[in-house]
Amino acid sequence: MFKKVLIANRGEIAVRAIRACKELGIRTVAVYSEADEDSLHVRLADEAICIGPPEPSKSYLDVPTIMSAVEVSHADAVYPGYGFLAENPKFAEIVTKSGVKFVGPAPSTLELIGDKIKTKEIAGRVGIPLVPGSSGATDLEKAIEIASEIGYPVVLKASAGGGGRGIRIVFNEKELREKFPVAVQEAEVSFGDGRVYVEKFIINPKHIEFQVLADSHGNIAVLGERECSIQRRHQKLIEEAPSASVEDRKRKQIEEAVVEFCREINYEGAGTVEFLMDEEGNFYFMEMNGRVQVEHPVTEMVTGVDIVKWQFRVASGQKLRIGKVKRNGFAVEFRINAEDPDNFLPSPGMVEELVLPGGMGVRVDTHIYAGYRVPPYYDSLLAKVIVWGETREEAIKRGLRALDEFIASGKGLKTNVEFHKRVLKTKEFKEGRHHIGFVEEMMV
């Protein structure tokens, strides 16, 4: 096992990783920007190194500075968390070539799954259903031809996109001619790769993802699925495990396909294979994320598997020893953001009063505390409230109770707690009839 790990991230995921390391007997090094000097991950780590000013490009995305921190701290591993450099193959390669272990997939694997066109080809090869569309990157005229064949609406996607970015929905040929060059330019600016492909736009699908863990000895475990259909502008807000809409037969079928896909790409570490599920229950491959997901706690709650600890274990060369995964009950996660609940505008400020929910079946992952000032430079995530119940109905009721208890207030600070409660009270969510466009419908 590693002796010292540098956590190349901030916020709640940095805290989560530090706690896992402490339980494994690993010393930790926190890196922080000047805006995060008082953040909880800095307090909890064994060592802390300032890596620059608040701007992410000059701190958490500054590879040379982070590598300097690795060198001076004598860390023998780097944990990237999610976001920032977590899925950056060049960063993973630099870490690896320096003689330090990157806690995640190999650089070549990250490069492969970062190319949505190549991963679609591999998924199709192992028998995973694909959304009808182009077989690879396409130009405008070919896109028009394909759209006429598969029918509108269609969606334009950046080959190097991910996390809900680089997506444009098109409803007719006129829109396609207008949006295609914009999509190419946007992909070039955002990802340094202007390739774009076209797919059939599936109306009112659910977003279903399968959690995997894989070691370097060929062992692959699928920990079941999560549903992440409550989202706004492709950003997830509420996640649950398992999905109430996935039948056991279909679950087993998809899990077997996911194992074959991971084997095909020599995957190692924690990852998530993501799908769209249409109204008839048909699955279509979307992408693979080569990192821990924000929503990993709901899987931990229903399986009892500590995903983050296993990331460190398999990265150190240990074999997966999970055995047959048994699912117990239902879990729901609510992303508590520093946002106005009515218009989703960012609302950072001082946390003057903080009351976190507790009790049976309630978990809170957070980096904030009373007296902490939420900086305006980063993701607005303040905390994740995760609840568990023997039944989905019990989990929803426990979620409402936990959200009622959650208080984070202060000058300028607002949270989206009331939004979450509104969702839980809708008939559609209670009956599992929500889809990825539900929030937009609800907010009209």
Image (cartoon, rainbow, N blue to C red):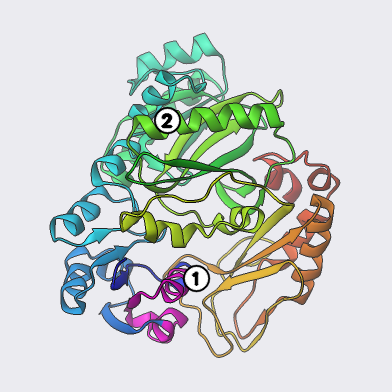
**Can residue 92 be seen?**
yes
The residue at the point 16 percent across, 73 percent down is 71
- Locate the N terminus and report the quarter of the image it occupies: bottom left
x, y percentage for residue 431? 83, 42
Q: Which residue has dot 2 on it?
A: 261
Q: In the rendered image, which quarter is residue 399 located in? A: bottom right
Q: Which residue has dot 1 on it?
A: 12
Mark 2: few/some/many CA within 10 Å (<14, 14-19, 20+): many
In the figure, is residue 144 to the left or right of 93?
A: right
Give the structural element (helix, strand or loop) at label 1: helix
Indicate whether 360 appears above or below 34: above
| Relative depth, front residue between 260 and 32 | 260
First in residue order: circle 1 vs circle 2:
1
What amino acid is at disc 2? Phe
Give the structural element (helix, strand or loop) at label 2: helix
x, y percentage for residue 87? 34, 50
| Relative depth, front residue between 110 and 172 | 110
The residue at the point 45 percent across, 13 percent down is 146
In the figure, is residue 191 to the left or right of 16?
A: left
In the rendered structure, which segment of residues is drawn in magenta?
16-44
